[in-house]
Amino acid sequence: MERNRLDISRRKILFGALQGAGVLLLSGCENIFNQLHQNRKVLSLLESVEGLNRRLLRFLTGSNKLAQEFSEKDISRTFKPNGNPPPFTMEYVMNAMSGWPSWKLEVGGLVKQPGQFSLNDLKAMPARSQITRHDCVEGWSAIGKWKGVPLTEIMKVVQPDPQAKYVVFYCMDMDTESNNFYESIDMVDALHPQTILAYEMNDQSLPIEHGAPLRLRVETQLGYKMAKYIQRIEFVENFKEIGQGKGGYWEDRGYEWYAGI
Ligand SMILES: Nc1nc2c(c(=O)[nH]1)N[C@H]1C(S)=C(S)[C@@H](COP(=O)(O)O)O[C@H]1N2
Ligand SMILES: [Mo]
């Protein structure tokens, strides 16, 4: 059932993308495409071009463009904190109480200059503010103002290698079975100007329930991609060996990796 639904939506996406690209110009192609799609070999071939397809899809839907930004008066009066409870280790609590003196963002993997950044280091870097809408798959949205350092600024310092295809965010919180939250995005989203590591929300220090001291904002994507409580960032070629291999905590549990809005 679940498998079926995924197949149907994937078929729609692939068909839409091919159609948009002018590949299916002749009438009658839709039938052929549908027949082909039932063939296992063709299916795996299509899957292998999913990376390319994703880029095409993004281009066609325009989700590589800037997400809508709002004005101060649009900011939601309440913004629901969602997901795991904050990390409750002694270290986290002590740090939270004293302005994060010993927390450091670690950045490594496929980079020329692995680095560590204190919160003050991050605040000293060029910053960006944006008022955007957060959409959770659970069916709620909220508008908030975020300030942080663009991920591109970090990338200028650490200099990812050309083989780096994804950026993985490792978080300090865990679920009831002690699985740590993590997420990943690709280079298109990493380089997007609205992709920031936020340390402020609505002109205040990022509240604990919203991911203090640092959380990702990737405005082209749904809420579950926006890793809170970030400890470490890793540039990788693929995420096969990480977690259950699907690229994120929720992806490992069946959500789509590409959660474009
Ligand atoms: N580390 C971590 N990040 C997370 C989650 C989480 O459980 N742990 N939940 C995600 C989900 S599903 C949503 S909707 C947003 C919620 O962000 P908010 O608490 O600021 O509303 O965080 C995302 N990032
Ligand atoms: Mo969510």
Image (cartoon, grey):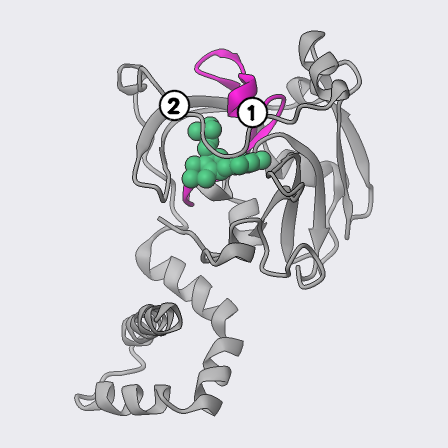
Q: Is residue 159 magenta?
A: no
Task: Say which residue appears at 69% left-offset and 10% top-offset.
Answer: 99
- Residue 237, placed above or below residue 172: below
- Residue 113 image-quadrant placement: top right
Q: Quadrant where the N terminus lies?
A: bottom left
Magenta span of residues: 195-222
- Residue 232, placed above or below residue 35: above
Task: Say which residue appears at 27% left-offset and 83% top-offset.
Answer: 24
- Residue 245 image-quadrant placement: bottom right
- The x, y position of residue 94, in whole percent, is 74, 13
Going by the numbered disc 1, the residue's amino acid type is Gly
- The x, y position of residue 222, in whole percent, is 41, 44
Q: Secondary structure beneath disc 2?
A: strand
Left or right relative to 99: residue 224 = left
Q: Looking at the rendered structure, which numbered label has been put on residue 144?
A: 2
- Residue 233, placed above or below residue 172: below
Q: Which residue is mark 1?
A: 148
Q: Is mark 2 within 8 Å of ligand 1?
A: yes
